Amino acid sequence: MKKKIVIPQLKAMKAQGRKFSMVTAYDYLLASLVDQSDVEMILVGDSLGMVMLGYDGTVPVTMEDMIHHCRPVAKGAPNTFIVGDMPFGSYNISRKDAIHNANRLMKEGYVDAVKLEGGKTVAPIVAAVVEAGIPVVAHIGLTPQTASQLGGFKVQGKTDEAAQQLVEDALALEAAGAFAIVIECVPVAAGRAITAAVSVPTIGIGAGWDCDGQVLVFHDMVGMFDRFVPKFVKQYANIGPTIKEALNTYAREVADGTFPGPEHSFGVNK
């Protein structure tokens, strides 16, 4: 059985050039499977808004939604480091609200750290949450909660000036106390520059191979969510069609009377 990784180990892995992995999970069953794997970290992402709740984006996700999903993940994966997403509206009103809601994710959701989106502008919020004793993962590049401000779900940091801004954002977040930084949907060169500029681990999602770790949405990587498949996703399995075929076979056997059979039924004692 693996042992839960801790923050100093993640920092040591960056220094040693050792890569680590993270996947999303939103329920007990999936979390327990991740816990039996070699993956070091779980993100209970607000992507559950699309994957689990059917929303078009992450903005409608509430604190109650996040806590509801974080709790079973924590129970299912006691040996995996768990990061819970701070949903839109939970930290962008005031530092007091940010600390209160981060406390809720830790106390009620049982997570090991929280994640929030934004660059320099949220650095004071990150600092306040860290000072309150709560570990923070930052998130820059494409930030889904504010994608409308970025012109949609598009690659960020495509010019020298934009990439430099991301580097400055990362440095500000590191100075604020974030112990890791997610970098989403940027050119390889930008991911490389950010990773080289900071001493904390970076976690890439569409940010190239130079990041210290990688994260993928589980349902994307196994072919269960096909509404939209980003370019940066590699499908390690394609179980969506297999599940649909199993359901169709079941429905067909029920309709034609071949299920249940004698082997699935109970007899009566004489």
Image: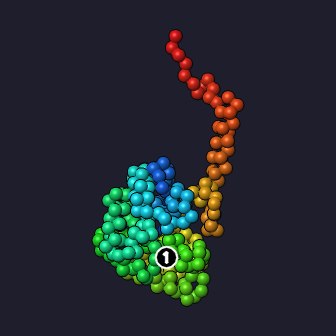
Residue beneath the point at 55% across and 85% down: 162
Residue 262 visible in the picture: yes
Q: Quadrant of residue 56?
A: bottom right
Q: Establish if 159 lies above or below 78.
A: below
Q: Establish if 257 lies above or below 152.
A: above
Q: Quadrant of residue 247?
A: top right
Secondary element at image label 1: strand
Residue 170: x and y, percent? 45, 80
Residue 11: x and y, percent? 41, 71
Task: Looking at this view, name the residue that lies furthest to the bottom.
Answer: 161
Q: Which residue is mark 1?
A: 140
Task: Looking at this view, name the residue that lies furthest to the top.
Answer: 270
Q: Is residue 46 left or right of residue 135?
A: right
Residue beneath the point at 60% across and 25% down: 263
Residue beneath the point at 44% across and 55% down: 69
Identified by mark 1, the residue type is: Ile
Decide which of 21, 225 is in the foreground and name it: 225
